[in-house]
Image: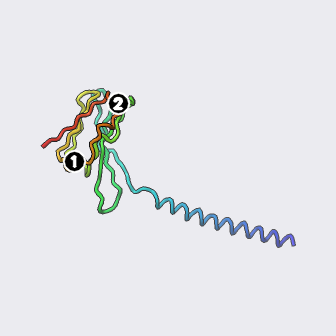
Amino acid sequence: MRSAIKKALFNFGGYSFWILLVLWAAFSLTLKGCESTCYHEVVKSVASPDGKQVAEISIGDCGGATTDFFGGVDIKSDNPKLTAENLFIFDGRPEETGLEVRWVSDTELIISISDLYKARYINPNGRKSADLKVKYEYRK
């Protein structure tokens, strides 16, 4: 009688192990399929004259043959008052928009573009404080 119980418990443990392993694998594959296919890549960094702030131009793509690249301009700094996110969002690649980013001083940045149709969003409120000055220009 004891050997029948031991055999039943041994079989139950073995079957449970394999069932849980298969369920875990299926769950992992399901989560992997839900991951975003978007990626972002910094393509250019422009340092301020003192080198403490950096304007980063990044592009992203969410995959697929029918989607285009998109990009943005962010300011990174150790000083929280001189940081900014999504100051300018554009469609395509930076060279297609004629995007130029240049520092006038350590706290003043000019973002200029030559193809206005590629501008998606201009966000002067992306700055953390008024200490960072951003000007936008359109070049013909």
Tell me the residue at 20%/40% (across/down): 112
Disc 2 and disc 1: Cα gap in Å?
29 Å
Extreme residue in the front direction: 125
Q: Residue 133 appears in which quarter of the rendering?
A: top left
Label placed on residue 95? 1
- Give, as a three-letter code, the residue at label 2: Ser
**Which residue is depicted at the point 34% across and 47% down?**
41
Q: Kindly identify the amino acid type of the residue bearing the numbered disc 1.
A: Glu
| Residue 40 position (above or below residue 74) | below
Q: Quadrant of the N terminus?
A: bottom right
The residue shown at (82%, 70%) is 5
Left or right side of 86 for 119: left
From the top left corner, tell me how far across and down residue 98 is, in percent: 19, 45
Residue 51 as seen in the image, left or right of residue 138: right
Quadrant for residue 8, please give it. bottom right
Q: Is residue 97 above or below residue 102?
A: below
